[in-house]
Amino acid sequence: MTDVELRHLTALAAIAEEGSFGRAAARLGYTQSTVSQQIAVLERALGGAVFDRPGGPKRVRLTPLGSVVLDHGRELLAKAEALAHAVDRFKAGDGRIDIGTFQSVSNVILPSVVRRLRDEHPGCDIRLSEEEPEQPQIGDLDLLFYDGRVDGDVEHRKLLDDPYLLVAGADAFPEGPVPLELLDGAPMVAWPLTCDQPAMEQAVARSGASPQVVFRSAVNDTLLSMVRAGLGSAVLPWLAIRGADVPSDDRLRIHELRPSLPPREIYLHWRAGRTLSPLAARAIEIAVEVAAELAPPASA
């Protein structure tokens, strides 16, 4: 039985349905001798005839053994067809993709990535998880966005530099760039000390300024609500500011800082040495395209 192949079962089914080797060969696009050879191989593998051949114009008919083989063979052929269809869909970009993300990317970059993936591949299954751990791991994810490089056996693509800007109440500072020294002792609201936040605050300290952090929250909208309420200002990256639509809020003002702080770096990671699915490969291409369109303002 190990010599039985799907092509033999396909020939068996076609002959049974057409009633002749010649018509089955025409349907399958083979020569009649090729179909005859396939049935001969099948019969040798089974140890018995699968067709009674009356000769002349009469229809060939399945033997009892042929009927048994065809009944089970149809199940195998159906499964093989389903498998081929699934593989074709996978190669076309359908399937599942698991993406790790964080707040700014979720608000600004991923909506465009998800929309374009779903437009191109309506049958795709996109799963997102949003975390901002201190030591991120790609684990079972296909792709991972993170504001920095991830340790381990991963490949990466830098998407953009995300500059830090000052968000303050409309009348808190004069228009234009704000010297970092003016933040010394000033009340500030800020993210928790995870991801790139410690590096940013250390850069502020190296400039000689020591702001007074009066509130920390990982939620951008909460921080901005506190800025609007007058609790303090916030130093946030451009993606966070854009995602919260700060430029359209006349209660807030965006300022560049002088000297400027080192920008936050946004990377996209995937496991090294693993073949990417077509869907994951396309997601990377789209993310790179979307990031290139997100140019921070030349001046705030």
Image: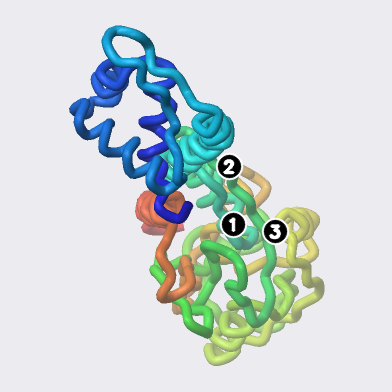
* Residue for badge 1: 98
Mark 2–mark 1 contact, CB under 8 Å? no
Callout 1: SS? strand
Residue in front for this viewpoint, 157 or 141: 141
Foreground mark, 2 or 3, reads 3
Residue annotated with mark 2: 248
Rounded to the nearest angstrom, the CA distance separating label 2 from label 3 is 16 Å
Left/right placement of residue 36 relative to residue 189 reads left
Contact check, label 2 and label 3, Cβ < 8 Å:
no
> Tag 1: Cα neighbours inside 10 Å, few (<14), some, or many (≥20)?
some
In front: label 2 or label 1: 1
Mark 3–mark 1 distance (CA, rounded to whole Å): 24 Å
Q: Nearer the viewer, residue 15 or 260?
A: 15
Residue 200: % across, % down: 57, 80
Q: Amino acid at mark 1?
A: Asp
Residue under the image location 27 percent in, 11 percent down: 56
Question: Which percent across, then down, holds residue 260?
Answer: 45, 75
**In the image, what residue occupies the spot 55% across and 79% down?**
180
- Can residue 117 be seen here? The reply is no
Say which amino acid is labelled 3: Asn
Numbered circles on residues, count: 3
Q: Which residue is mark 3?
A: 220
Structure colour scheme = rainbow
Considering only vertical position in the picture, is 153 above or below 250? Answer: below
Relative to the observer, which residue lies in front, 206 or 9?
9
Mark 2 surroundings within 10 Å by alpha-carbon count, few (fewer than 14), some (14 through 19), many (20 or more): few
Q: Give me the C-alpha separation between circle 2 and circle 1.
A: 33 Å
Say which amino acid is labelled 2: Ser
Q: Residue furthest front?
A: 54
Q: Secondary structure at mark 3?
A: helix
Q: Secondary structure at mark 2?
A: helix
